[in-house]
Amino acid sequence: MKKRILVTGGAGFLGSHLCKRLLSEGHDIICADNFFTGAKENIASLLNNPYFELLRHDVTFPLYVEVDEIYNLACPASPVHYQFDPVQTTKTSVVGAVNMLGLAKRTKAKILQASTSEVYGDPEVHPQPESYRGAVNPIGIRACYDEGKRCAETLFFDYYRQHNVNIKVMRIFNTYGPNMNPNDGRVVSNFIVQALKDVDITMFGDGKQTRSFCYVDDLIDGMIKLMNSRDGFTGPVNIGNPVEFSMLELAELIIKLTGSQSKLVFQPLPQDDPLQRQPIIELAKKELDWEPRIKLEEGLIKTIEYFKGIIHA
Ligand code: NAD
Ligand code: UDP
Ligand code: UDP
């Protein structure tokens, strides 16, 4: 059945892949984005499809459209961008959630929230199950993002309990792939761009901190499976790749795959930078029959191809 689907943040990295996938499944898509970190290039190939509609819209303002499903992805995701205007970041998560939940309540649409592993902060429990409540510094420089996303989860569960809104909350762990913004300072894009340009690779701290990286195609599979999951399953559910790498291992692999001459330079670790992060994905396996398939090396090769194309363009 053709569904009318709103994707907020649809011109961003994850949103653009999601719009493309949903269109290919035959749905009617409204993409709402204020282009803070998103790019028209990410969705240029969709613009001549009559079932793709682009709205320049900021989710901190109300939006009245008629839809069946809402994927709420609008929010800058990289530390450089979400710390650029931290007040706007909190507003985007909190006021944006109120508006999209109000829209879902009025239209009886199902609504999925792109939450984040950052709700766990710098975790004292490793790896992280959904039941872990997190260790976030509420007054630190990451709080605009972390606490904004935590408050958005609160709003989702209160609209669920108070107004019976059909919610799905997804905690996304570090994801990478084509359409990442080359300037957003995330580690995978930074290292690849630096390696391709043969300039120094900026390693923050001693490089022993870890992350678990999920390739975007796997992530989008999980997102769509969550939206289509059984009635009453709200999450929150972790979606990410549980294979953990240190930033040193990541840099070595990218240097190998690009054949780069780049050397590592060590710079101070940013404030509140989590030392380790790895999802427990048992809930996603059980409820969604989902687990990631694409190994880091395979995903990096595709991502490197993408960056080669835009760097030399
Ligand atoms: P992105 O920055 O590429 O995309 C975010 C999009 O939201 C951009 O197109 C941006 O222009 C838009 N946007 C920002 N503020 C807006 C506003 N007020 N109104 C309308 N649009 C706005 O980031 P992404 O990696 O695609 O992340 C998408 C979502 O997934 C975000 O909510 C992010 O918090 C979440 N997430 C991503 C990751 C990851 O590793 N990529 C991890 C955890 C959570
Ligand atoms: N809203 C929206 N689109 C809609 C319905 C509501 O953007 O189709 C916004 C509106 O700004 C409202 C918010 O969502 O303030 C919350 O809506 P809700 O119905 O929960 O609360 P109320 O209207 O009572 O403030
Ligand atoms: N990082 C790094 N060099 C960079 C960018 C990031 O060493 O040029 C580190 C960063 O300090 C963090 C990890 O890589 O420990 C992941 O950073 P990213 O910003 O991609 O994601 P997040 O910290 O939000 O998980």
Image: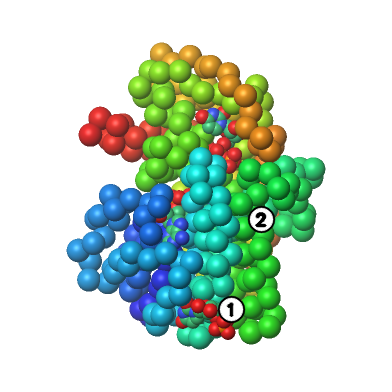
Q: Which residue is at the front of the view, 67 or 298?
A: 67
Tell me what residue is drawn at x 66 percent, y 63 percent.
151
Quadrant that contains the C terminus? top left
What is the number of callouts on the image? 2
Q: Can residue 291 be seen in this view?
A: no
Say which residue label 1 marks: 166
Q: Is mark 1 on a helix, strand or loop?
A: loop
Tell me what residue is drawn at x 36 percent, y 24 percent.
196
Position of residue 201 relative to residue 164, above or below, is above
Q: Is mark 1 within 8 Å of ligand 2?
A: no
Q: As drawn, is 205 to the left or to the right of 259?
A: right
Q: Residue 41: x and y, percent?
A: 28, 49
Q: Can residue 271 be seen in this view?
A: yes
Q: Residue 214: x and y, percent?
A: 53, 45
Which is nearer the N-term, disc 2 or disc 1? 2
Q: Residue 288: x and y, percent?
A: 59, 64
Q: How is the image coloured?
A: rainbow
Q: Which residue is at the front of the view, 122 or 79?
A: 79
Tag 2: residue type? Glu
Tag 1: residue type? Asn
Tell me what residue is drawn at x 46 percent, y 28 percent.
191
Q: As drawn, is 266 to the left or to the right of 208?
A: left
Q: Residue 147 carries which label?
A: 2
Quadrant that contains the N terminus? bottom left
Quarter of image, res 149: bottom right
Tell me what residue is drawn at x 65 percent, y 49 percent.
143
Cα distance in 3D space between marks 2 and 1: 23 Å
Quarter of image, res 90: bottom right
Q: Residue 241 carries which label?
A: none
Front disc: 2 or 1: 2
Which residue occupies the extreme left position in the image?
Answer: 48
